[in-house]
Amino acid sequence: MQSKYIVILGSLMSGLGKGVVTSSILKILDFYDYNAMPVKFDGYLNYDCGTMNPYRHGEVFVLDDRSEVDMDFGIYERFLNKNLTGDLSITGGKLFEEVITKERKGGFLGEDVQIIPHLTNEAIRMVEKVAEEKKTDVLVIEVGGTVGDIENSYFIEAMRQFALRHEVIFINLTYSPQLDVVGEQKTKPAQLGFRSMLQSGIRPDFVICRSSRKLEEKTKEKLALFANISKERVIDDSDQETIYKLPLHFMKQGFDRMLLNAMGLKGRKANKSKMASWSKKVEKVIKPGSSTRIAIVGKYTDLRDSYASVKEALIHAGAALDSRIDVKWIESDTLEKGDTGKKLEDVDGILVPGGFGKRGIEGMVNAIRYARENKVPYLGICLGMQLMVVEYSRNIAGMKNADSSEFNGGSRYKVIDLLKSQRGVDKKGGTMRLGLWKCRLSEGTQAYVAYGRESIAERHRHRYEFNNAYRKALEDKGLVISGTTTDGKLVEFVEWKDSFGIATQSHPELRSRLEDPSPPFVSFVRAAKKLAKERL
């Protein structure tokens, strides 16, 4: 059948959760066995997300095909349980590059190249190409930013034009604030957002409204009046116990049937087996049998979106093991003053995630040493693996002041160093070791037990590697190298012998799903859960 299209626009402010709403709609369509795929438009002029600051933008999500994309792609994948591709990410940078490249090649001879029609036509072409190549039943397009932003205005205009050629359902995500001093759900901000949308030539077919508590009927009535839609098409998006409950919450309001009818997709019934499986897993997140306390010791914990995938991977592992994960966020530079034990004594597991730059590094090393010496389960990811090697080199292998050349180029023992292929790189975008890499695990190791097989593959995003010049010396001192690339040249996993401590150069959190949790995260949480039980 010819592809249908849904365009999701936000109004008022960012941070309302368009990615979660988009993912919930994708999941609903998946429940009905439609081939639904997302497209995300981001108006920034970066070509991709690879060079962005995690404090401002949140984590950079990496796909199998090496693409560095917006963190919303992580939400899409976690809901759909599918591996997505970089062509689903359309940025302002990509659009402008395509148009300027065509202009330089003479593709617009005799024309004044303008935002309309040239840039908007290119946006339309990209969307149509994705729908054709992916053979989608429904393409769900999330427009980053908010209506009224200069950055996304040309893409909103492109979607207005797009609706003249194709069947498109427009959905507006808005917000109804509730002031404590008044107690009433306010609609005036949303009304202004509707006005801005209408001025752009777009009338929403549905309104999804974020709020702290369930939308009142009078709130729905007023929103419907100003959006020019029926009250039934105003969908409650109030706070839920977990984001994974949202598709089911929408369906309880009849949103699935209304949406399918609006697209002319009638007659198909939801796959009860899929829905039951999802519901069961959601229930495990909401009502776990026990709790496990995990410390995440990182450089960007003030903005937790920087570690969104790590947090979700812990939730997935906890649900699989019937345990709630209580995360203790610790800014790593606060552990550099010698009070490590006081801040970590109440946790059942310690996780050091990825990151770049020197700030807070010694605090992470202190946390790793505490985990090793006190036999607290440890999981290291990317930088967390590199620092596990640094800590072991310094305190077990006798390599005084061992370090990574990223932080101390003058160290005598550069146990972590740049690959030769990285030394001449002067461009920062898209030049790291990225995407899916295969790995061979050694039988009998913690990593092998976690995955249950020898051959695996995980996603990567880094420049520095384990320095093979120190491999034998560290192995002789007891460090276990449990996984390498298939050619044996690059170290991918290291472990401790005497307690649960496993670290990987990859980012396994990027492939973790509620329906398919990451194996090292499950093993880590299992070990932490065991310690928590022993402490009772």
Image: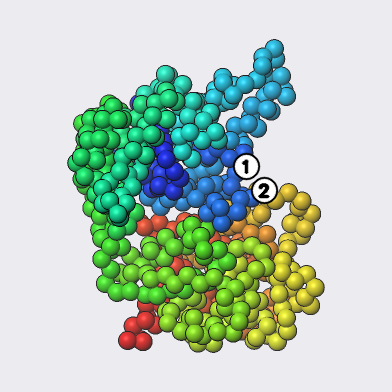
Q: Decide: few, some or many residues near mark 1? Use Cα within 10 Å; few <14, some 14-19, many ≥20.
A: some
Front label number (1 vs 2)? 1
Say which quarter of the image contains residue 46: top right
N-term mark: 1 or 2: 1
Say which quarter of the image contains residue 251: top left
Q: Where residue 147 sits: x, y (%)?
A: 45, 34
Cα distance between the residues tagged 1 and 2: 9 Å
Q: At 51% from the left edge and 63% from the top edge, which residue is drawn?
A: 302
Q: Secondary structure at mark 1?
A: loop
Q: Where residue 426 sits: x, y (%)?
A: 77, 51
Q: At 64% from the left edge and 86% from the top edge, which residue is drawn?
A: 396
- Tell me if 167 is positioned left or right of 509 in this view: left
User: Can residue 26 be seen?
Assistant: no
Residue 232, compared with residue 108, is above or below; it is below
- The image's colouring method is rainbow
Q: Which residue position holds label 1?
A: 46
- Count up the numbered dots: 2
Q: In this orientation, which residue lies closer to the viewer: 233 or 499?
A: 233
Q: Where residue 277 sits: x, y (%)?
A: 26, 54
User: Can residue 507 be seen?
Assistant: yes
Q: In this orientation, which residue lies closer to the viewer: 183 or 109?
A: 183
Residue 440, compared with residue 182, is above or below; it is below
Residue 390, compared with residue 258, is above or below; it is below
- Tell me if 493 is positioned left or right of 132 in this view: right
Mark identifier at residue 429 = 2
Q: Residue furthest top?
A: 110
Q: Where residue 136 sits: x, y (%)?
A: 40, 33
For the residue marked with disc 1, what is the amino acid? Asn
